[in-house]
Amino acid sequence: MKRTISGLSAAAMLLLGTSLGAQADTIKVGVVAPFSGPFALYGKQFQEAIQVYQAEHGTTAGEHEIEFIYKDSGGPNPDQARSLTQELLIKDRVDYLAGYVFTPNAMAVAPLLDQSETPLVIFNAATSAINAQSDYYLRTSYTLWQVSMPMAEWAYDQGIRSVVTAVSDYGPGIDAENAFVAAFQEAGGEIKDSIRMPMSTTDFTPFIQSIRDQAPDALFTFLPGGPPTFGFTKTYNENGLRDEGIMFLGTAETEESNLQAFGDAAIGLTTAYHYSADHDSDLNRAFIAKNTEMHPDSVTNWATIGAYDGTHLIYEMVEAAGTDGPAAIEAAKGLEWESPRGPLVMDPETRTVVQNVYIREVERDEESGLLVNREKGVIATVGDLGWGK
Amino acid sequence: MSLFLNILIDGVAYGMILFMISVGLSVTMGLMRVINLAHGGFAMVGGVVAHVLMSEAGIGYVPAALLGIVATVALAWPLERLIYRRIYGFGDLQQVLATIGLTFLMIATVNRLQGSSLLALPLPTVLAQSVDLGFRTLPLHRVIVIGVGAVVIVGLWLLIERTRFGIKLRAAVDNRATAGAIGINTGLIYTATFCLGAGLAALGGILGAEMLPIEAYYPLRYMVLFLVVVAVGGMGSIGRSFLAALGLGLIETASRYLVPEFGTIFYFACIILFLALRPKGLWGRLA
């Protein structure tokens, strides 16, 4: 049992001479995410989402006060993530962990979770294999299989019969390629070529030209956000693949924080993903309105929603089980709730949320003049399709 | 045949972009012999100013780009007077440390003011077209980069080889004390040349932004790209930097077409081999 009572409130209680039992205890949640460097946007968005949730639901869950402690992990750095997590567990005595943007960072702390029986809610890292490493992982983001397989099946249903895949040559890219190829071939489609592009690529023209020469019905891609996605989509347009009728299929490429920078080149790009800031529901509009009110410069995207739902999950676990880690995990399994992205269920087996995957197309919103991911179709209640693969 | 043509066209276009983004460094590091790791920082400053002017003030692409270059030069001038002037005499390692520190300052400032997401420099619709070459298309933007690159190389060659300024510059770089003794105002020559380098960096940053988008971490992300061009070209010549950029563009493009999986390894293996054989760069003489 790791019950923590802050020294300050204990001292206050002594002074007032009140009984200890009347005071609610404080449960601490350690958030490990990048708050500096090229990926600092993630940390900022996680923090903003937590603040929005707290503004809406207060800082208590059940009889417990909840306090968040933030640690800066920098970029993909498993050693750093591990030592920060250790520090949070030992020095700050946290009862829950959250955040974790990169797969290696999340993977590195598995033994710590088992030893300390601490639940960890992943806000982002999207490799299926993470949750198999420890029973204490829960995930409120998505997995690459979860969005790539529906993309392939949808593409086949639309009459697309041949595809060239072109992914960045690193873990998530290869995951996305495997998932797409498996589902597309299963449906009966033909994969003409699978290109793996080096991470350091700045000029995508050679890859785009070879795709064009093979004349598939569509190309499927996965790239890290920011400059590579920018370069790839620009090159796709400039070299006339759109005019040749080669459809662009992707997943996270058109996420909201960089979308406006793509300009008109992004219009018509088709992606399968679990969250669009343009999602048509009152809950989503209220969520974005609150976030924009509290953080005027903030762009709401999948990182915001992952952290927001993760915070909800932590509140539910604290209310049900307090500081008892194993009981908290049991309480989380099968939990259902309505999120701004749509209905969610915490899958008892994979511990990743079962959610809707939306087929979206980039359009320019007539009212705001901004580029948005407009939902064109929905594939309901998709679980982690990569579990055990 | 069409594969060969593709490699040739894309290789030259990419090489020209490499040249444009690193020509400022060829001036400061190649001609002035300062290891200026902040080169990418100046390119970014130009891009950021142009971005802000376009998105906040609604100014068009060309005037915004010109003002971005002017603003970068306006920043480079006091920086040269206050900081770089003291760096010239340092050893290599001290120059590296001083200029990388400057780079971090620039990154942090842009990150603070503009955040870390991409800062778009949207092309006007006239420029955002593709040119039909019959068997394929080429973005008009790249054609323009090739044109501007050609103008810059000719302009720099004339400036350095055919003007009094160029003569004084070469004299000042070769032997500053003697140049000063015969009445050349070496301080002014250095300031002007440094500002020229910074202005070219900004021009390259803005023109290259279609491929290497402007964002807060731009100076670090592409540092290797700039340095390789100057290292392969060798110190002291703009023309060799130009040839190096074209060669590197062709090698990288060819490897991406022919062996995509090993593209990066092949590219850097070529560079390592080249530098092992010719540590002073193209036509470099061993000291």
Image (spheres, coloured by chain):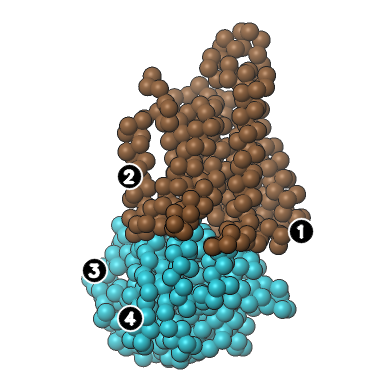
| Element carrying mark 3 | helix
- Identify residue for label 4: A182
Say which label, 3 or 4, has the lower sequence index. Answer: 3
Where residue B58 is drawn, which disc sits there? Answer: 1
Identify the disc placed on residue A111.
3
Q: Position of residue A197 (x, y in %)?
A: 39, 61
Give how far apart the Cα atoms at labels 3 and 1 are.
54 Å
Q: Which chain is brown?
A: B
| Residue count near mark 2 (Cα–Cα under 10 Å), binned few <14, some 14–19, many ≥20 | few
- The chain whose colour is cyan is A
Lateral position of residue B275 relative to residue B238, left or right: left
Residue depth check, mark 3 versus mark 1: number of the one nearer the observer: 1
- Residue at mark 2 to residue at mark 1: CA–CA distance: 46 Å
Q: Amino acid at mark 1?
A: Gly
Contact check, label 4 and label 2, Cβ < 8 Å: no
Callout 2: chain:
B
* Residue A78 visible to an observer of this rendering: yes
Residue under disc 3 on the same chain as residue under disc 4: yes
